[in-house]
Amino acid sequence: MTFGDKLGAVFDRSGHLCVGIDPHAWILDQWGLEDSAEGAREFGLRVVEAAWNRAGILKPQVSFFERHGSAGYAALERVIAEARAAGILVIADAKRGDIGSTQQAYGEAWLRPGSPLESDAVTLSPYLGLGSLQSSLELAEAAGKGVFVLAATSNPEAAGLQTARVAETERTVAASMLAGVAQWNGSRKDQSERRFGSVGVVLGATLELAKFGININEEPVGPAVPVLAPGFGHQGAEVSETRRLFGALTPGVIVSESRGLLSAGRDGIADAIARRAEEVEAKRG
């Protein structure tokens, strides 16, 4: 199965909610855990347990494990492995991006079958050009994995770059990323039979995408583009606004939420995920 096929199956079985695993120091403290690799591991495993049979996608934020060094990476490896063993799709939020053999190595770290950090998908940064990510896109395709390319993000300092125009096409950078991803998905074999592509984009749910040059009413050519959409819950985006925010992209939207769920605490996280998952399917449109 391609990653797009797996994602569609998860949507049908468990809905569109993605739970972030972000072991901030303050959240670990709230949960009664130490701000350490051991605390991050315990936190992550409890979120995996809470998500089982309630949400089908988890997104560990790599940086919060990485800050604990090698022990943090060992903790992350365990969390990823447990989530995937439970049948949950894992999107490693690593935001890697480089050129040549370096980018290839990043892809192997997160997408190669058998890698200690093997995930189902990874977030990548296209600052050096979408073409610089080709080795990772090819590896993902060969291994049945997914990639999410940053396109329009909610941090204010990104807007100047992401709304800049690309000389060759006059599209914005953000729109160029979306178009390039759609083109990649549409060029894969058997694409006409695919419901979702295996390469997606990251689009912030708190943004007015028209300001980033993205026409949400334009139907993508080929399979639907998966959209990892952070910004729901604590950051202010409402699930009931999904159709207005994403238009024709709505079928592929992954509703990503972290702090709004994690702040329910170790005793309330399972119920919070279950309620939110039901709400997402009832209100997303």
Image (cartoon, helix red, strand yellow):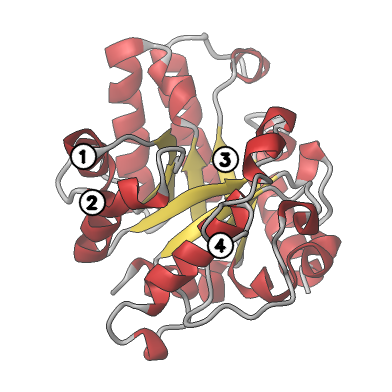
Confirm or deny contact between disc 1 and disc 2 (CB under 8 A): yes
Question: Camera-side residue: 136 or 230?
Answer: 136
Q: Which mark is residue 20?
A: 3
Quadrant, the N terminus? bottom left
Q: Distance between the residues labelled 1 and 3?
A: 30 Å
Secondary structure under tag 2 reads helix
**Residue 82 on image: x %, y %:** 34, 43
Task: Tell me whether circle 1 and circle 4 mark residues in contact (CB < 8 Å).
Answer: no
Q: Which residue lies furthest to the front in this view?
A: 167
Residue plotted at (41% across, 78% down): 186
Residue beneath disc 1: 100
Q: What residue type is labelled 2?
A: Ser
Provide the secondary structure element on which disc 4 rests: loop
What is the CA distance from the residue labelled 2 to the residue labelled 3?
27 Å
According to the picture, the residue beneath numbered tag 4 turns out to be 169
Q: Which of 16 and 263 is in front in this view?
A: 16
Q: Is mark 3 on a helix, strand or loop?
A: strand
- Please tell me which of labels 2 and 4 falls first in the chain: 2
